[in-house]
Image (cartoon, rainbow, N blue to C red):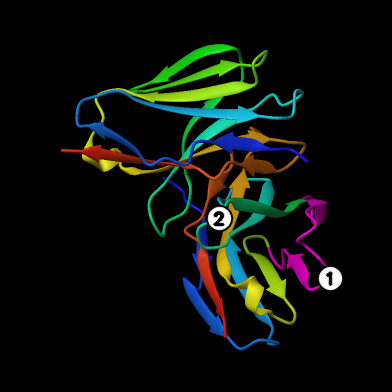
Amino acid sequence: QKEVEQNSGPLSVPEGAIASLNCTYSDRVSQSFFWYRQYSGKSPELIMSIYSNGDKEDGRFTAQLNKASQYVSLLIRDSQPSDSATYLCAVLGSYQLTFGKGTKLSVIP
Amino acid sequence: EPEVTQTPSHQVTQMGQEVILRCVPISNHLYFYWYRQILGQKVEFLVSFYNNEISEKSEIFDDQFSVERPDGSNFTLKIRSTKLEDSAMYFCASRPQGVAQYFGPGTRLTVL
C-alpha cells in the first residue's frame, strides 16, 4: 500500500514569513511529485511539480526533493493571507496520484 | 487558459438511484481520471482512462461504477445504485503527454 504522510497542522505563520510544509512517501520507486493547493470546498490546484533531487523554485514557491530520504517539502516565502489553504502532497504511481491528507496553512495578517 | 469543467456542481440523489457525473477534459489532453474526496478525508483515486479504455482502477471502483467517453469531448462517471457512503466530492482530472494532472471544480454528490 503506497502511503503519503503529511502533518495535518494547522500550521500558522505570520504574514511575510516563510511557511515550510513537509511530506514523506513510502514507495521508493516513485519519480514524480506534486504539490496541490486546495481551498475549502474547492478542487486541488497544481502549484508545483518536482522530479529530480534538489530544489525547484517558482516565484514564491520552492519545492525540495530528497529521494534517498523519501522526503518532499514546499517552502512558501513572503506568505500572504491568500496562501491560507490546505496543501496536498501527491506522488505519481503507474497512472494514479496518491495524495496525503494535506497540511492546513493559516497565514495571520 | 483551458480548464477541466464538470457538471453538475451539486447532485442530490436517493439511495439506490443511478447518477451520471459529467466532465469535459482539456481539449488536447489524452489521459483522464476520476478521483473522489469524502468530507475531511484524502483525495482518492478511482480510475484512469486512456485510448478509450480503463488503464487502472482502484479497489473503490467496483461493479457499481463505470466510465465512458461517449464523444470526443465528454468523459462520464456512472454510479449504478448509489449508497450513502458514495456521498463525496468527485473530481475529474486530465493530463497531456506530461505527468501533471489538472483537476476540474468537482461535483458534490449527496446520497440521501
Where is B26 relative to A46, above or below? below
Residue A101: x percent and y percent? 54, 45
| Chain identity of mark 1 | B
Image point 68% across, 79% down: which residue?
A: B83
- Identify residue type, mark 2: Gln
Q: Which quadrant of the structure image shows residue B53?
A: bottom right
The residue carrying pointer 1 sits among few (fewer than 14), some (14 to 19) or many (20 or more) residues within 10 Å by Cα, namely few
Image point 69% across, 38% down: which residue?
A: A3
Callouts 2 and 1 in the same chain: yes
The N terminus of chain B - image quarter: top left
- Identify residue type, mark 1: Asp
Q: CA distance from mark 2 to mark 1?
A: 23 Å
- Label 2, on which residue? B41
In terms of depth relative to the viewer, which is nearer, B10 or A90?
A90
Q: Which quadrant of the structure image shows residue A68?
A: top right
Question: On the picture, is A48 further left or further right than B61?
Answer: left
Q: Which quadrant of the structure image shows residue B112?
A: bottom right
| Chain identity of mark 2 | B
Magenta residues span: B50-71
Where is A1 relative to A49, above or below? below
Residue placed furthest toward the left? A109
Residue A84: x percent and y percent? 31, 42
- Label 1, on which residue? B63
